[in-house]
Amino acid sequence: MLVKLIIRNYAIIDNLEFVPDAHLNTITGETGAGKSIILGAFSLILGERADTSVLINKEEKCLVEAHFNVADNPIFRNTLQGADIDHDDVCIIRREISTSGKSRAFVNDTPVTLNTLNTLTTLLVDLHQQFGHLAFEDDHFKIDILDAIAQNKTEKATYATLYDTHRKIALQLADCANKQAQSQKEADYKQFLLDELLQADFKDEEIEHAGQQLKQMSSAEKITGVLQAGIQLLEEGDQPMTNELKRLGQQLQGIIDVMPEVAPLQERLTSTWAELKDIAAEFEQLEKKVSIDQEAMTQLQERLDLGYKMLKKHGLQTTQQLLTLKDELAEELKATINLSNMAEQLAKEEARTLALMMTEAEKLSKLRHNTAPQIVARMNELLPLVGMPNAKFDIKIKKQKPAITGIDDVQFLLDANKSSQFLPLEKAASGGEMSRIMLCIKSLTAKAMHLPTLIFDEVDTGISGEAARQVGMLLRDLSKYHQVICITHQPQVAARGSRHFYVYKDENKDGRINTRIRTLKTDERILAIAQMIGGEQPSEAALQNARELVAI
């Protein structure tokens, strides 16, 4: 609730402090005293754009500051936390207009945009000038009223949970279906590519090995000639090198005893002979491996051609990359099958949650249909009491596609003049009528709905007598559950306030006119109400009437 409002250097207000109580605060004063100016300054707190023309004193900045007790407002505190703004039991909202005309907004000393400020303050203040027609154009608002009176909180929460669950599953199903459709378009081509690779059946490094083997076969004669020449030199010539080395080694062996220095040379020669014998043997083995089988060469060339074709087709370089691609294609095709299975499971779950959701939706709708006639009857009792004797209220509920609020489209209708033609409330009622209708509705929901500070600006315009008295009683009853601030010209309404404020003008020592506000004591209040009844110099009868009104 609003704890304190401070206004400095705004229009004809130099310094004003307003401290309402937690119930019904009535504000009265002469026409032109500045009640609307106070409301205009307060609108800055609600996110209205600043008008630099309000800076009468150009040497000082304009400041409007509101203190709210938010200890029992968890939604607002959570919203502050979500906006990364410090929060405590008291929230201070401040607007400043500098001498240059620049406007800034702060929440607990954190700078905020006007959009953020507007979003936050709608959780703190309901000013009917802003809320009136727009509220009734909001389907959620009308349904909230219906549900509050029907006490559908549990059913509404159950349905909302199922709706959210179903919505998430439906989104998952749609996403899965899209992926499945896309995968299915590609699946046939991927299967074709996989079949090609499976049919080719390449082994590890087969293409590389085939290329090397084919090169060898193509050079078989040259390779054989070189190997045979080596064998001839080492083993099979007229004077094979190995034989000559063997003979020389034997000769060196024969002179070791007379020349010991040749012993190391003889050992090295013997080692060289053994190495050349091994080389000759390996030449023979390699010669046996060299093939000039034309049929084998043809087969290798075919495998190599197929391998190169596959590599070029897929933009790859090695056999291993082809084998990796084959595995990837197999996994992707498997994933397509998994998507199909997932879509089937999600479809079953979507159908199951939809059935549960619709069951709860029908239950919720039935409760709303049962409650609507009660609201209609009660509203039609209240409207004549608040000065609308010819008006008839009605509620029409039609089915709609499931939404977060259910399957009901709720319309509040009004026949303002017994025309038997009901129109949407926001189109049929005037501004003053809308204020009183809103008051009636809020009085019905006072116990059931959490409402912010309620501000009514001359809700009693155009009425008097018994209608004004009834408006005062409704406001008083509403203030048992919510803080209410009401600007009024009706004594019957002013008398119902738990705290009465009087707005007036005075002249300072510099001859400047300022708007002031003060809390009236009991005797001052009686006089102010008597003046509202009988003029500036009220009669004793007016004073007695005022005493009776205050005493009620």
Image (cartoon, rainbow, N blue to C red):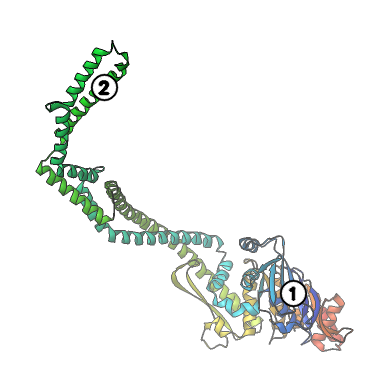
The percent position of residue 329, horizontal first and vertical second, equals 29, 52
Q: Residue furthest top?
A: 257
Q: Earlier in the sequence, mark 2 or mark 1?
A: 1
Q: Name the residue under label 1.
A: 64
Near mark 2 (Cα within 10 A), the count class, few <14, some 14-19 or many ≥20, is some
* Number of numbered callouts drawn: 2
The amino acid beneath tag 2 is Leu
Is 490 placed above or below 219 here?
A: below
Q: Is residue 254 left or right of residue 339?
A: left
Q: Name the residue under label 2.
A: 269
Q: Is residue 375 left or right of residue 163?
A: right
The percent position of residue 456, horizontal first and vertical second, equals 69, 78
Residue occupying the point 28% across, 48% down: 318
- Quarter holding the C terminus? bottom right
Q: How far apart are marks 2 and 1 (CA)?
A: 112 Å
- Quarter holding the N terminus? bottom right
Residue occupying the point 75% across, 79% down: 99
Near mark 1 (Cα within 10 A), the count class, few <14, some 14-19 or many ≥20, is many
The percent position of residue 446, horizontal first and vertical second, equals 65, 69
The image quarter containing residue 18 is bottom right
